[in-house]
Image (cartoon, grey):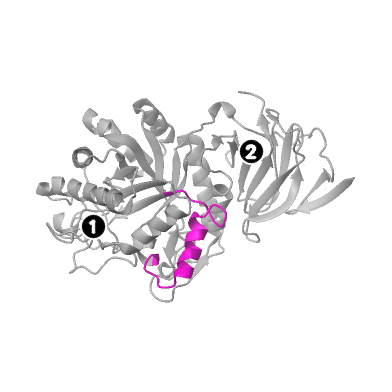
Amino acid sequence: MLALAAIGGIVINHYMNQAPKTLVFREEPVHLQLDQSYDHFEGWGTSLAWWANDLGNWKNQAKVDEVMDLVFDPAKGLGLNIVRYNIGGEENPEMKALRPGGDVPGFQPEPGKWDWDADAGQRSILQGSMKRGVNITEAFSNSPPYWMTISGSVTGAEDGGNNLREDQYDAFADYLTEVVKHYRDTWGITFRTLDPLNEPSSDWWKKGNMQEGSHFSNEKQAEIIKKTAASLRSKGLDGTVISAADDNSIDETVFNFSLYDQETIDAVQQINTHSYNGSKMEELRELAGKLGKKLWMSEYGTGGSEPHNHEDMTSVQELAERIMFDLKVMQPSAWVYWQAVEDEGANNNWGFIHANFNGDEQYEMTKQYYGMAQFTKYIRPGAVIIPTDEGRTLAAYDAKAHRLVLIIRNELSAGSKAFDLSGWDAATTTSAQMYQTSPEHNMEKLEDIPVYANGIEVPVAENSITTVVLEGVIPTVD
């Protein structure tokens, strides 16, 4: 029986019982580039700075659990499986500039004194995330403790230059590794990687900022990397290796690794980069391969320049574009968002969830949450990432489940997108599931669409992200 279904403003033909054998493409379809696919994708993540410091101290545990489920549970929420734990520096008590949540407690408030009861809020969120499926953890630092710094503040140097005192490099390395050791020995958490740096090449870390930050010249980056690696070895922390350098720009990451001496390169086991800026994604991918290092996109966030609007799709489209571009070209093993939960009072569109950091323990979902879910719920750790020959699409394949996922971002008017699936055996599949986020939909499941022997045509709504899931398909080419 032939039926007509109007989905997203597009009228398509499909059979109720069995899809037609072939599809006549009205225009050149999208091709999946299997020869450029890769299988080292290990998941999606978020930093715990700064939201976990606040949320972990909420008294309403039911609300905490709700947010945790939304972020980490693979069935109830995004299913993020990677977290980056922020080892706080703790600000000088005479300074009062840090933003809500940004005043992360440190474990060494003064030389020779350790406080292992500190940072209970972030630790609680870390432990709760692991109960919900997080299986990869990284520790990182934004700044040394204030008393190790030149300026006397974790917010940066007076001039935005190096802020770690010359006589404190060994002490800083010892501080970071002692925290890693205590987490392993006391709380049974082994951080897979430790990154002693965060956007170290940037010169905007100046005293009086609202957050922790510390500039390190390339020479000083190398020094702290080597000292931290040596400290890990001296304490028998073989389960934790060094990642670096978490630069703001992909190009800065490439540049810094071009200057590091061999000893520093040998000390780094994982290259971390942020992808806020820079264009040398292919160069970084090739560099990581040449050096034999794992590559992470360890931080990206969007929405900072937008007015507060939970329904705005602008940041959703920016997010989708960044994910697709990074996965297709840079091909990192992990893709990590900055902070999954943002302060409601910040009046911006950062974050998937907005929570009240100063007042009632309440939260709200944003469009970014649903945009992220279009990726994380269906491209799971271990999936093969498949680039396409079209900039607004991405594919992934789960070999164990025989599940093919197609994702389309469309910031334009409504239309359709056809995919050539001639390299796939979909004989047991007659229809595919379709999920969509748009001004009208929040990752809603729409009516199934037909699968043909040679391809599929997907209706896409105006200003939308669409995910198509095909079950029971097998590639017919190696």
Q: Amino acid at mark 1?
A: Gly
Considering every residue shown, the one lying at the far top of the view is 478
Residue 325 visible in the current orientation: yes
Return the residue found at the far right.
Answer: 1
Find the magenta span and give its range.
Answer: 55-82
Q: Position of residue 301 (x, y in %)?
A: 43, 53
419 shown above or below 446 = above
For the point 54% across and 36% down, the residue is 385
Q: What residue type is disc 2 on?
A: Leu
In this view, the residue in front, 265 or 134, is 134
Quadrant in which the N terminus is drawn: top right
Q: Is residue 79 magenta?
A: yes
Mark identifier at residue 404: 2
Q: Residue furthest left?
A: 167
Residue matched to label 1: 89
Front residue of this view, candidates 245 and 76: 76
Residue 120 lies in what quarter of the image? bottom left
Q: Quadrant of the C terminus?
A: top right
Q: Quadrant of residue 402?
A: top right
Residue 92: image x %, image y %?
18, 64
